């Protein structure tokens, strides 16, 4: 039988759909997830840190004591006791009524984008910045301005110039602690300057802090939101301290924006899973995180040290890297003339993967940068992986 000509598709996609780019990271991860590859590419917490036994007990208790409510539709704001716990755990005065439980902090980014960005609104981001935030903002069609940043964080003179150069930005998106991708932490002095400058310029801040608890030697300086709660929306997450599959995070917003964020949340998914919220509240009671998080810190710190030692031992001296004081990522820079994206297939062929840094730039990328996660590979894999990567870099140096 002759195949019939396919009829034209009835589906007309919105212009907005064209702005929803596939995550370069997820595409890359497919390449790096081949068997036998040592991957420094993923942004995944170490599964060794998931408190499986505590979850097992908490799930059983929730089902025994509160099953009907836990399995029912629930309030969009979130489960009351969890909101209270979140508010009580933050280092500034937070009314639980200002806490919205979200489906991961990624949803917080999406809701903030919907509520704050009009087509062609200007927004400011750091250089580099979190790719997932750029993805969440893109469908709202903002003009994204990448503000120059150094190892201490946002360059204040560049921020002033950016605000003076065009229509005032709706907000600046900032990641002060152990940034994804660069691993850097904003210094106390820079936070004070950013907070004062943002207030002076009437520039709201969207502060994203999923890694803040994962410090190695000392806690980072207090969040920007603690300095000016009325001028900031704060995003937090349970993904890195408990487990990412819970898909639970939260935002804290000033009273004048909270109702709109809540309405956006209602439209998006009615509420975050009530069962998961109760399980997390149950796991967290009796100060569990105070015992659990130090174990994550110790593991990640030792992993970072293994990677730093391996880099020092193997890398050519033309390669540079930083020394993150928390979190999951280290940021490195290849010698002049090398491009991290072009080098990746060659590294994968040698059995090691990383994420080229270019994807994390809203403006002109630095093609020599790359992100290395030090938390999922074992110490022995880190040593072998860094050794293989150094060999590939040496071979391609001019
Ligand atoms: C900077 C940053 N923000 C937000 C997220 C989203 O986290 P989640 O939705 O799991 O809370 C991530 C995830 O890796 C991240 O790195």
Image: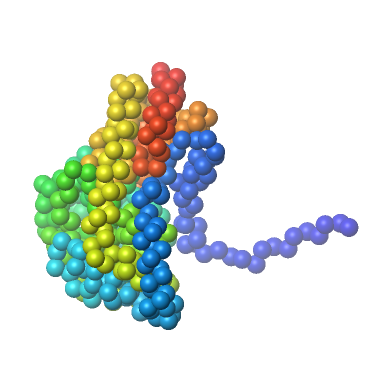
Residue 163 can be seen, yes or no: yes
206 on left or right of 156: right
Q: Residue 321 occupies which quadrant of the picture? A: top left
Q: Residue at x 40, y 37 (%)?
A: 378
205 on left or right of 381: left
Residue 340 can be seen, yes or no: no
Q: Residue 242 occupies which quadrant of the picture? A: bottom left
Q: Which of 359 and 373 is in front in this view?
A: 373
Q: In this view, does 266 lie above or below 176?
A: below
Q: Which residue lies furthest to the top in this view?
A: 398
- Color theme of the render: rainbow
Q: Residue at x 18, y 73 (%)?
A: 95
Residue 22: x percent and y percent? 49, 52
Q: Residue 299 occupies which quadrant of the picture? A: top left
How many numbered marks have been drawn onto this rendered protein structure?
A: 0
10 on left or right of 223: right
Give the quarter of the figure containing the C terminus.
Answer: top left
Residue 115: x percent and y percent? 33, 69
Q: Nearer the viewer, residue 381 or 33?
A: 381
Residue 241: x percent and y percent? 31, 55
Q: Which of 179 and 335 is in front in this view?
A: 179
Q: Which residue is drawn at 41% across and 39% down?
A: 377
Residue 73: x percent and y percent? 42, 80
Give the quarter of the figure containing the N terminus.
Answer: bottom right
Q: In this view, does 1 lie above or below 336?
A: below
Q: Which residue is drawn at 37% across and 34% down?
A: 379
């Amino acid at each position: 039988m002759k195949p019939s000509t396919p009829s034209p598709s009835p589906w007309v996609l919105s212009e907005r759909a064209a702005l929803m780019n596939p995550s370069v990271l997820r595409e890359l991860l497919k390449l790096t997830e081949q068997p036998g590859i040592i991957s420094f590419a993923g942004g995944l917490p170490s599964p060794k840190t998931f408190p499986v036994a505590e979850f097992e007990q908490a799930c059983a208790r929730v089902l025994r004591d509160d099953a009907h409510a836990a399995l029912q539709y629930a309030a969009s704001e979130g489960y009351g006791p969890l909101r209270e716990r979140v508010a009580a755990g933050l280092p500034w005065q937070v009314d639980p009524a200002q806490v919205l439980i979200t489906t991961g902090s990624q949803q917080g980014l999406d809701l903030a984008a919907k509520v704050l960005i009009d087509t062609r609104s200007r927004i400011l981001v750091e250089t580099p910045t979190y790719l997932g935030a750029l993805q969440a903002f893109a469908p709202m069609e903002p003009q994204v301005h990448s503000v120059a940043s150094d190892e201490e964080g946002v360059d204040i003179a560049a921020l002033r110039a950016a605000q003076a150069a065009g229509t005032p930005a709706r907000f600046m998106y900032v990641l002060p602690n152990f940034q994804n991708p660069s691993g850097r932490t904003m210094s106390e002095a820079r936070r004070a300057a950013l907070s004062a400058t943002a207030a002076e310029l009437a520039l709201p801040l969207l502060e994203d802090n999923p890694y803040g608890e994962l410090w190695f030697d000392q806690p980072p300086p207090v969040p920007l939101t603690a300095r000016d709660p009325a001028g900031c929306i704060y995003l937090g997450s349970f993904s890195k301290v408990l487990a990412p599959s819970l898909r639970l995070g939260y935002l804290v917003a000033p009273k004048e924006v909270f109702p709109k964020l809540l309405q956006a949340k209602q439209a998006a998914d009615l509420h975050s899973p009530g069962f998961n919220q109760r399980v997390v509240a149950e796991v967290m009671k009796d100060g569990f995180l105070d015992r659990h998080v130090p174990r994550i810190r110790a593991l990640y710190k030792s992993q970072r040290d293994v990677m730093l030692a391996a880099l020092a031992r193997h890398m050519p001296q033309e390669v540079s890297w930083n020394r993150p004081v928390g979190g999951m990522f280290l940021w490195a820079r290849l010698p002049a003339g090398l491009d991290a994206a072009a080098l990746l297939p060659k590294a994968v062929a040698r059995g090691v993967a990383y994420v080229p840094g270019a994807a994390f730039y809203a403006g002109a990328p630095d093609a020599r940068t790359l992100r290395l996660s030090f938390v999922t590979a074992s110490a022995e894999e880190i040593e072998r992986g860094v050794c293989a990567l150094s060999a590939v870099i040496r071979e391609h140096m001019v």
